[in-house]
Image (cartoon, rainbow, N blue to C red):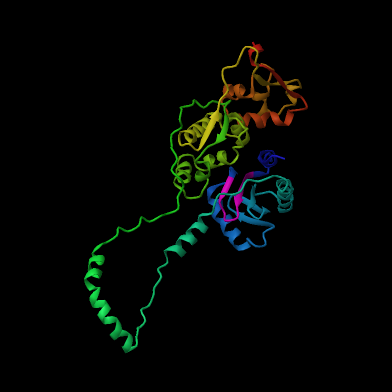
Amino acid sequence: MELERVLTKLKFDESVSGYALITSDGHPFLSFSLPDDVLPLIKGTLKIHAGDLSLVNVLTGKGMVILSRVDPKWVLAVLFEPDFQLGGALSRTKAVVDLLMQVDLPPPPNSIEVEDEQTAIEDEPIVIEDEPRTEPREFVEAVEPIESALSLETEVVQEEVLPPEPEITPSFEPVAEEPEEEVAVQHGCVVHRSDRYNETLTLESDLNIQIKKEFSNLGVDILLIVDEKLTVYNIAEHLSRPVEKTIEIVSWCVSKNILHVECPEVLEPSQKEIIELPLFEGNIDKVKKKHRNIIELCNGKRTLQEIATEVGIPYFEALQSILPYRGKTLKIIRTDKSSRF
C-alpha cells in the first residue's frame, strides 16, 4: 500500500483540519494544513510521552490534535475540528495508523541533535595536570653529559617548525551544484534523486536551510515522495499543490543537483497521450449548490485542470467538488488528447 493513498483518507475527511507525519524528535514531514503554532505543543508532548506514546490528545486553540506512534521513527499527528468528539478522533486516527503500519516508510533525516551532542563531546577540552617528576640522583648525573653533548644538535632540530596539520572536519564530498545540461522541467517529466539529495534532507545542512527558506516545508515534502517513478504532475496531485508551484520547486532542485528529471521526447505519431475527462450524467438539481459550478462543466470535453482554471479555483478544490459523485453519477473518460477535438 502506498503512503500517499493512506494519507488521502485524512485529506478528504471533513472533520480533519490538518495532519503531518512527524519524526520522533518533533520535525514534521509530509504535512498538510497543519498550523505552525501547533508544532511547539506537539514537540513538547513528544518529549514527555516519547517512551509510552500510543494515542495521546493535545488540546490547542485550533482544535484537538491526536498523536499516535506508527513505528519507532515516525509519529502521526492529526488536527481535528474544534467541535469534533474525542472518541471519533481516536478511532479515525487509529484506523489510519493501522494502514500506515503496512507501508514501507522512508527513514527520517539524520537528527541534528545527535550531531550537536557528538560535536560537544569532541570540542570538550581535555586538561592534563602536570605531576611533579622525580628521578634518582644517579640517573640525572649519568644523563647530564649526554644532554650537553647533544645540546647543539637538539637546538637545531628545535628550530624546524613543522606546519600544523590541516583540521579535518566531516562534511559531504563536494559535488557540482549545476547540472551538466539545462533541462526545461515539465509536468510530464519523471523526477529522480541526484547526488545532493541526502545532503538536502539532513537537518540544518546548508541545502536543508536553503530549501526551507525558499519553499517552507513543501520543498522537503516533495523530496520525501520522490521515488524515481512519479512525474511532476503526479507529485503535485499527491500533495494537492499547484502543478506550476511543483515545477518551480523541482526546477530549483535540479539547478542545485538535488534532483534530476527524465522528460519524454516529443511524441511520435504512433504514440498517444491519454487524458481524463470527467462526465456528469446525473440530475443537476440533486447536486449541492457549492459544487454545481464545477459539475455543470463536467461534460466529457474538458479535463478537471481546465475546469478549475476556467472557474478560477485551485485544482484541489475542483477535485473535492467531484469526489462525492465519482463512480455514481460522474464517470471519468480516458481518451487520446489528439482525438478530443
Q: Is residue 283 left or right of residue 39?
A: right
Looking at the image, is 63 positioned above or below residue 333? Answer: below
Residue at the (37%, 81%) spot, across then down:
131
Q: Quadrant of residue 220?
A: top right
Q: Quadrant of residue 180?
A: top left
The residue lying toward the viewer, choosing from 202 and 326, is 202
- Residue 303 rendering spot, x and y as whole percentages: 64, 21
Q: Quadrant of the N terminus?
A: top right
Residue 203 on the magenta span: no
Looking at the image, is 284 positioned above or below residue 338? Answer: below
- Residue 16 rendering spot, x and y as whole percentages: 66, 44
Residue 297 in sight in this render: no
Residue at the (66%, 11%) spot, across then down:
339
Majority secondary structure of the magenta segment?
strand
**Which residues are drawn in magenta?**
17-29
Q: Quadrant of the C terminus?
A: top right
The residue lying toward the viewer, choosing from 337 and 297, is 337
Residue at the (60%, 36%) spot, across then down:
239
Count of numbered labels shown in the rendering: 0
